[in-house]
Image (cartoon, grey):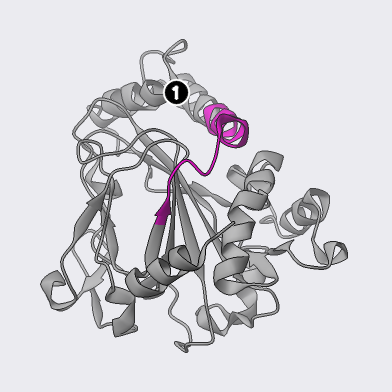
């Protein structure tokens, strides 16, 4: 049960970390999906002669780090690693995570009573030393580019799949920064969006170390960033987004096309008949796959 005090913390700070919310039963299948995706990518690179071996037998946190380290030393350009998502990661395990009552219970308490699971879910492999995955300070709304209005809400949910701290790039956040609304932004040298004004304009940043099972819920106007990964392991995470069911897609620059490019589904409702099944969500993705 999400308490009144926890809701007040979210409203004050623009985020809340709920400790120990999820267990291995929820997160293990997601790691398996990612591990299969890693294997596909590794085998392709190996078959193309771009890496010397496929590093089979390496653990979840290390295999992609070994591949990235070798490939980055090659004369070939490094693969795009910032985010993996859409149909490449689409799986029943992602649906089950989206509809986990521990997540939807908090999401409905914050933006409910019925919620839509947004289709822009992302797996983020922060490889050691990869500067492309060190995101600048930003509000998620920087990347939405649509209508900015108080009644248009998007709740972001960030879930680490390994323990995170300052060494491997835990999230940084400016408590209370969502009260400034959408702030002026610019594009930096890494093609990331960042505030025009110094971060200190909006408050004092804090680091948020987290353990596996902790979940970070935050407002679309909350300033946050990720640090550098200085370890020799990958910092794996997945982030999800929810919106109030029936909310128009005006908050995004794509408008209604957003729901075509990133098919959404009703993840929780007081009327169970309104909740979409995995098969229904999967069918929407399959109907909108790029034509070869």
252 left or right of 162 in image = right
Residue 42 image offset from top left, x and y in percent? 47, 25
What is the magenta segment's predominant secondary structure? helix
Q: Residue at x 38, y 43 (%)?
A: 81
Q: Using the rendered view, name the quadrant where residue 271 is placed.
A: bottom right
Question: The N terminus appears in which quarter of the rendering?
Answer: bottom right
Label 1, residues with CA under 10 Å away: few <14, some 14-19, many ≥20: some
84 or 6, which lies in front? Answer: 6
Residue 110 image offset from top left, x and y in percent? 54, 70
Q: Using the rendered view, name the quadrant where residue 186 is placed.
A: bottom left
Q: Residue at x 43, y 17 (%)?
A: 59
User: Does the stretch in magenta take in 77?
Assistant: no
Q: Residue at x 59, y 43 (%)?
A: 89
Q: Which residues are magenta?
A: 17-37
User: Does the stretch in magenta take in 27?
Assistant: yes
Residue 86 image offset from top left, x and y in percent? 58, 52
Read off the residue under disc 1: 60
10 left or right of 75 in image = right
233 or 192, which lies in front? Answer: 233
108 left or right of 75 in image = right
């Amino acid at each position: 049960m999400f308490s009144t005090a926890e809701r007040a913390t979210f409203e004050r700070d623009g985020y809340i970390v709920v400790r120990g919310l999820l267990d291995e039963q929820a997160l293990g299948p997601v790691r398996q999906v990612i591990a299969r995706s890693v294997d596909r990518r590794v085998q392709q690179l190996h078959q193309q002669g771009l890496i010397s071996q496929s590093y089979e037998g390496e653990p979840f946190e290390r295999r992609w780090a070994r591949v990235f380290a070798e490939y980055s030393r090659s004369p070939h350009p490094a693969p795009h690693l910032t985010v993996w998502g859409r149909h490449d990661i689409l799986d029943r395990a992602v649906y089950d995570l989206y509809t986990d009552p521990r997540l939807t219970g908090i999401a409905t308490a914050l933006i409910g009573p019925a919620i839509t699971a947004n289709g822009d879910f992302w797996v983020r492999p922060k490889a050691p030393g990869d500067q492309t995955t060190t995101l600048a300070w930003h509000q998620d709304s920087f990347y939405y580019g649509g209508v900015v209005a108080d009644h248009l809400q998007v709740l972001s949910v960030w879930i680490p799949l390994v323990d995170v701290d300052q060494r491997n790039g835990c999230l940084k956040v400016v408590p209370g920064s969502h009260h400034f609304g959408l702030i002026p932004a610019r594009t930096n040298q890494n093609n990331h969006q960042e505030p025009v004004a110094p971060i200190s304009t909006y408050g004092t940043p804090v680091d948020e170390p987290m353990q596996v099972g902790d979940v970070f819920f935050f407002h679309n106007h909350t300033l946050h960033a990720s640090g550098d990964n200085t370890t020799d392991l990958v910092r794996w995470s997945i982030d999800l987004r929810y919106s109030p069911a029936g909310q128009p897609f005006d908050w995004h620059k794509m408008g209604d096309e957003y729901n075509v490019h990133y098919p959404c589904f009703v993840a929780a409702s007081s009327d169970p008949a309104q909740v979409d099944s995995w098969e229904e969500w999967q069918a929407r993705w399959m109907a909108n796959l790029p034509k070869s």
